[in-house]
Amino acid sequence: MAKDSMDLLMQAQDALGAADVTNKFLTFFAQDKLYGLTIANVNGITQMQDITEMPELPHYVKGIINLRGVVIPLVDVNLRFGNPEQEYTDRTCIVTLEVGGNRIGFIVDAVDAVVDIPEENISPPPALTGSLSGYVVGVAKTGEGGTKLVLLLDSNAMVGEVSMVAGEINEMVTV
């Protein structure tokens, strides 16, 4: 993992350990778009590793990894959002989320930063159709003069959709 990725990892881990994570978001890139997830559900960030493929999974579920003794299904965010598959680079990483006892890894092109976004800088999402319609819960304006837009994602919706797949994978692995 590159030095700047390691710095972001340490910054994210510091934010994860903070008592108050209100309005703190982990931002990341997928297909040159900037997305954000509430840091409250982010379990960690890790570099890419060997993925064990599993049969008969949706095309966007790349397989599973063993992360510190826990089997975690991996979703390629680009594929899930209907983008073309991207080649994994040294900036590609896995963001793990934990919601309702389900832990899922999301493969992202690159992690950007942990940012504090005041409520007044978050707008409701525009009416969307397509693969993002159920996931985007807000649009945040960040950066100097609010010129940088971040699509804020619903962690519960993203993890919830894959949790049924995770249950099937856990049954396969423990048999």
Image (tube, grey):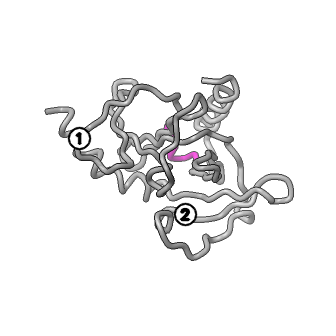
Question: Looking at the picture, which amino acid does disc 1 mark?
Answer: Pro
Dot label at residue 170: none
* Residue 12, image x, y percentages: 62, 36
Q: Amino acid at mark 2?
A: Val
Q: Quadrant of residue 147?
A: bottom right
Mark 1 neighbour density, 10 Å: few (under 14) some (14–19) many (20 or more): few
Structural distance between the alpha carbons of marks 2 and 1 = 29 Å
In the visual, does 6 lie left or right of 92? Answer: right
N-terminal of the pair, mark 2 or mark 1, is 1
Query: Which residue is under mark 1?
Result: 55
Q: Position of residue 112 (x, y in %)?
A: 67, 41
The number of numbered badges drawn on the structure is 2
Q: Taking 82 as reference, is 171 left or right?
A: left
User: Which of the two discs, 2 and 1, sits closer to the camera?
Assistant: 1
Determine whether the residue tagged by mark 2 lies in a helix, strand or loop: strand
92 on left or right of 165 = right
In the image, 33 versus 111, the foreground residue is 33
Residue 43 is inside the magenta segment = yes
Q: Which residue appears at 18% of the width and 32% of the height?
A: 174
Mark 2 and mark 1 in contact? Answer it, CB < 8 Å: no
- The magenta region covers 39-44
Residue receiving disc 2 = 136
- Give the residue drawn at x 64%, y 26%: 6
The quarter of the image holding the C terminus is top left
